[in-house]
């Protein structure tokens, strides 16, 4: 319960391929993205609506995605002709994000016990931290989960098996799911202790 996760709604739009758009062979990604056609349909997206967990398809979000496509490439956008946002299909999902937009990967502390045992700015050792035995998380990936979730899974596996980390220690510490709790308690020096 102490993890500061926020729900963020995202809607992708499905565009029927045109003769011109069929020439697209790679994903084009800037503030949004469009992928090559698959089965005659391009995926275009995606919106990012903080605090909204609605799962309904919205014409306004399709219009936003079409505006993003114009920013990505006027030529590609023109190749689709005039598409009515209300005529498009798509997909909606809810992502979880953290305040610093970095994922959380690692073991969880018992927040209540941490607050009881560690006074603000305490100099107690990291081995005194009260862990919730066996509870590890891999969450808060936002819109980049397809890239970050597998690497975070490798971090967790390495931690569980006491193997070398798949990244450097400062990056592993940056992903510590307890970082917000520890910072708020003045225990920044203990962030990443599980992987130290």
Image: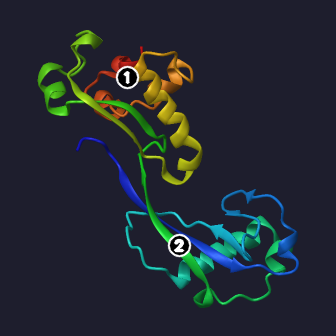
Residue at position x 49%, y 35% in the image: 152
Residue at position x 57%, y 23% in the image: 167
Q: Position of residue 52 (x, y in %)?
A: 39, 67
Against 116, is 61 above or below? below
As rendered, which of 179 and 37 lies closer to the eye? Answer: 37
Q: Which mark is residue 191?
A: 1
- Quadrant where the image shows the C terminus: top left
Q: Toward which corner of the image does residue 62 lie, by quadrant?
A: bottom right
Residue 192 visible (yes or no): no
Residue at position x 83%, y 61% in the image: 25
Q: Is residue 79 left or right of residue 149?
A: right
First in sequence, mark 1 or 2: give its number: 2
Q: Is residue 152 left or right of residue 138?
A: right
As rendered, which of 178 and 154 lies closer to the eye? Answer: 154
Could you tell me which secondary element the residue under label 1 belongs to?
loop
Against 181, is 78 above or below? below
Colour scheme in the image? Answer: rainbow
> How many marks overall?
2
Please rate how many residues cluster around mark 1, counting C-alpha atoms within 10 Å: few if below 14, some from 14 to 19, many from 20: many
Q: Position of residue 168 (x, y in %)?
A: 56, 20
Q: Which mark is residue 142?
A: none
Q: Which residue is mark 2?
A: 91
């Amino acid at each position: 319960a102490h993890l500061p996760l926020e729900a963020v709604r995202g809607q992708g739009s499905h565009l029927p391929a045109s003769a011109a758009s069929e020439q697209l062979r790679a994903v084009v990604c800037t503030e949004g993205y469009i992928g090559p056609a698959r089965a005659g349909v391009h995926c275009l997206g995606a919106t990012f609506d903080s605090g909204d967990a609605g799962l309904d398809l919205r014409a306004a979000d399709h219009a936003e995605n079409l505006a993003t496509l114009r920013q990505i490439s006027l030529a590609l956008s023109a190749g689709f002709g005039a598409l009515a946002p209300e005529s498009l299909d798509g997909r909606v999902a809810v992502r979880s994000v953290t305040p610093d937009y970095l994922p959380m990967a690692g073991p969880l502390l018992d927040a209540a016990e941490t607050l009881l045992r560690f006074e603000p700015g305490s100099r107690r050792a990291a081995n005194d931290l009260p862990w919730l035995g066996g509870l590890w998380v891999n969450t808060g990936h936002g819109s980049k989960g397809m890239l970050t979730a597998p690497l975070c899974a490798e971090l967790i596996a390495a931690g569980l098996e006491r193997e070398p980390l798949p990244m450097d220690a400062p990056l592993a510490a940056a992903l510590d799911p307890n970082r917000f709790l520890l910072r708020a308690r003045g225990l920044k020096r203990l962030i990443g202790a599980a992987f130290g």
